[in-house]
Amino acid sequence: MRLLPGFLDGDAQRALLARIRALLAEAPLYSPVMPRSGKPLSVRMSNCGPLGWLSEIGGYRYSGTHPLTGAPWPAIPAPVLDLWSRATGVAYPPEACLINYYGPDARLGLHRDEDEDAKGAPILSISLGDTALFRMGGPTRKSPTRSVHLTSGDCVVLEGPSRDWFHGVDRILPGTSRLLPEGGRFNLTLRRVTQP
Ligand code: SIN
Ligand code: MN
């Protein structure tokens, strides 16, 4: 993985947060459930872009519409598309922007991003708000892992072999950022879904 510490300065973080709030007014955060068990994830989610990633009792899938409102996802804001171009260097746009919100007790188990046809395209992750303890593994669930703190404004690019590696969020460190008055952390994950 490629870590871009402080890729967004304070002004850029505040501007991006305002865009996220506007998106969420249209496409509200909801609590997705785990496939099979139907247990709610601790992370709340929404999406923007032509395709949004869903975790449902029947499995994971991409959808053009919000599961609760039935409306098409709002477009990915231009400044976010610009971050994608600058951070990844690829010429094609992303199709999905997953918006994760982590409250103080939220976490995300070790997983791979594997629901996309565009296996060769990079993935960009953007962090805002409280610091996350992010765990990066390797090609198998048993591969050794390394942990890094992701702070507000940091970006991570998963590209090359790391595109398919296991990763997750062990925990959020409450009170580490003042960006979100309500506390917690937003993460945007930008992905190409169809073959560019
Ligand atoms: C994810 O892997 O979907 C999100 C990672 C993060 O929140 O940093
Ligand atoms: Mn992931």
Image (spheres, helix red, strand yellow):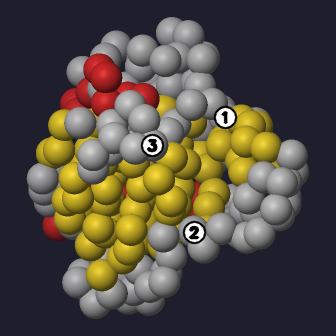
Is residue 146 shown left or right of residue 76? Answer: left
**Mark 3, mark 1: which one is toward the viewer?**
3
Name the one closer to the observer, 22 or 97: 97
The amino acid sitting under disc 3 is: Arg
Residue at which label 1 appears: 51
Asked whether the viewer can see residue 184, the reply is yes
Q: Percent position (x, y) of residue 84?
A: 33, 33
Name the one closer to the observer, 96 or 102: 102
The quarter of the picture where residue 92 lies is top left
Is residue 154 shown left or right of residue 24? Answer: left
| Residue lying at 48% horizontally and 70% vertically, measured from the top left | 107
123, above or below 24, in the image: above
The quarter of the picture where residue 157 lies is top left
| Residue lying at 44% horizontally and 85% vertically, measured from the top left | 104
3D distance between C-alphas at marks 3 and 1: 27 Å
Residue at which label 2 appears: 43
* Mark 2 neighbour density, 10 Å: few (under 14) some (14–19) many (20 or more): many
- Work out which quarter of the rendered image holds the N terminus and state it: top left
Tell me which numbered mark, 2 or 3, is placed earlier along the sequence.
2
The reply to whether the residue tagged 2 has its Cβ within 8 angstroms of ligand 1 is: yes
Q: Percent position (x, y) of residue 159?
A: 30, 26
Which secondary structure, mark 3? loop
Is residue 44 shown left or right of residue 11? Answer: right
Name the one closer to the observer, 57 or 36: 36
Residue at which label 3 appears: 141
111, above or below 165, in the image: below
Q: Residue furthest front?
A: 142
Tell me which numbered mark, 3 or 1, is placed earlier along the sequence.
1
Q: Percent position (x, y) of residue 69?
A: 84, 58
Tell me which numbered mark, 2 or 1, is placed earlier along the sequence.
2
* Mark 1 neighbour density, 10 Å: few (under 14) some (14–19) many (20 or more): many
What's the mark number on residue 77? none
